[in-house]
Amino acid sequence: MVAIFSCDLDAPTSSLPHFWEHTVGSGHAPLALRADWQTQMRRSHDELGFGHVRFHGLLCDDMGTLISEGDQFFYSFFNADQIFDFLLSIGMKPFVELSFMPGTLASGDKTVFHYRANVTPPRDYVQWATLIRKLVAHWVERYGVAEVRQWFFEVWNEPNLDVFGSGRQDEYFMLYRYTVEAIKSIDSAFRVGGPATAANAWIDDFIGFCTKNQLPADFISTHHYPTDAFGQPGDDTEAQLANSRRSVLREQSREVRRQAGNRPVYYTEWCTSSNPRDPMHDEPYAAAFVTKTIMEANGLVQGYSYWTFSDIFEENYFPSVPFHGGFGLLNIHGIAKPSYRAFELLHALSTEMLPVDGTHPTVDAWIVRGARSVTILLTNYALPHHPIATEVIQVKLANVHPPEQGTIRRIDSEHANAKRRWQEMGSPDYLSAGIVAELNAASLCDPAPQSFDFRDGALGFEVTLPPLSVAAVIFRFTARDGD
């Protein structure tokens, strides 16, 4: 079955703000002190447009933010400053996740992750509030109130899950109350939000709590993954995804958008799956999923923070295998995965979305107009174990000027797929500089000529897309008088 799509370039457009570039995720705060992390962060900002970064553990003992000797507290914000100094120096800002509990304030010894982050409530909420006030006041002194007003403060991480605490609303709501009051006591314009839940949970209850207690909630934050609550206990990731729905994240975003009302919505985690060792993270599957998911979230959210930008990540342990199924867009060597190239194609889009006619079970098309260009973004995507095949796509554009040039950029098993080249090398565990250079070359998503037919203001072209692929077809136009 041929997939046929059409578009009138004179049709009214809708806005495509680059909401997916607002924030991107990282792992554990001390990683941001590493030179390789900083190199990859700078590159991701420069090439993909990310504006904020969010990570866990800013308050953990390995950051030294608050420690004690006997009854004496020592506040040390130096490491946090080093990270934020770097971010500001490259044109980025922090999306501040206030987590986890400093040991000296902790009410228990429950921990999470390889780095043993304490996830118990504070034994004294007043002392917690004092820490938050001192920290935020320090940042105001260091960076200025105008700068800090551009940041976001998110209280905790996934408090609805037992792994990150008790899973009890009342404990989280108490923590939120003390935190938001502490921050707002410094400047009422600082943006504070939550509930930072997994799986879109607690939104109505959180808003109700804040309304009842006259507490600010400047934004709603939550997380979702397409593996959330699908399949049976013990299922592997592919089985969970097979039991999901093709556009399930769009469905969930719509519901959260409804619940949030006029409040901004920031998804501060989402990904292809919640598995930190999912082979599909490194493959073209992720590129197709990323592209489709982001384009379907348009108009529903203000921020959509992919988890994560880099495989420099250590929740389970720090890996050494170059392609190990990590969350990152870049692997530990900084080699771009297909998902990175998907963000690259998305970053290149303009902001005027045109309506598209045509449907297909696995192929989707979006058309975005620029000042002197038009981009046709195509995906051929299905969930694991669902039918998908190579498809021929025909696109027809009306009311078009004669194009100066047509190009296509592809992401699929044969293009922008460094993992495949690594496997052809025998999947070496450790890479020489020469191999890294070869894999970097294999990761590129270079343009190739795209043929087309043009007559009487109409343009047509045909593209063949293999399963689990992305293509961006771009037509550029010569400036005309009056342009």
Image: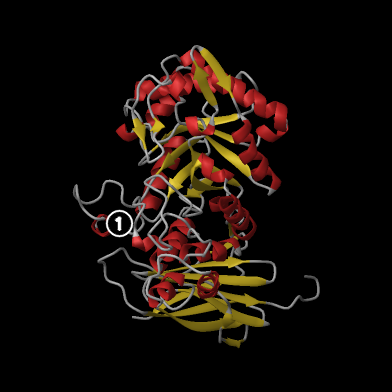
Mark 1, residues whose alpha carbon is within 10 Å: few (<14), some, or many (≥20)? some
Q: Secondary structure at mark 1?
A: loop
Q: Is residue 270 shown to the viewer in this render?
A: yes
Q: Which residue is mark 1?
A: 245
Viewer-proximal residue among 331 and 355: 331
Question: Residue 136 at x, y = what percent?
Answer: 62, 26
Q: Quadrant of the N terminus?
A: bottom left
Instruction: Give amino acid for label 1.
Output: Arg
In the picture provided, is 272 more to the left or to the right than 342?
left
Above/below status of 211 relative to 274: above
Query: Which image quarter: residue 447?
Result: bottom right
Q: Is residue 214 shown to the viewer in this render?
A: no
Q: Residue at x 55, y 28 (%)?
A: 65
Residue at the right extreme?
Answer: 481
Viewer-proximal residue among 321 and 56: 321
Viewer-proximal residue among 190 and 56: 56
Q: Residue at x 23, y 58 (%)?
A: 239
The colour scheme is secondary structure
Question: Residue 166 at x, y = what percent?
Answer: 32, 27
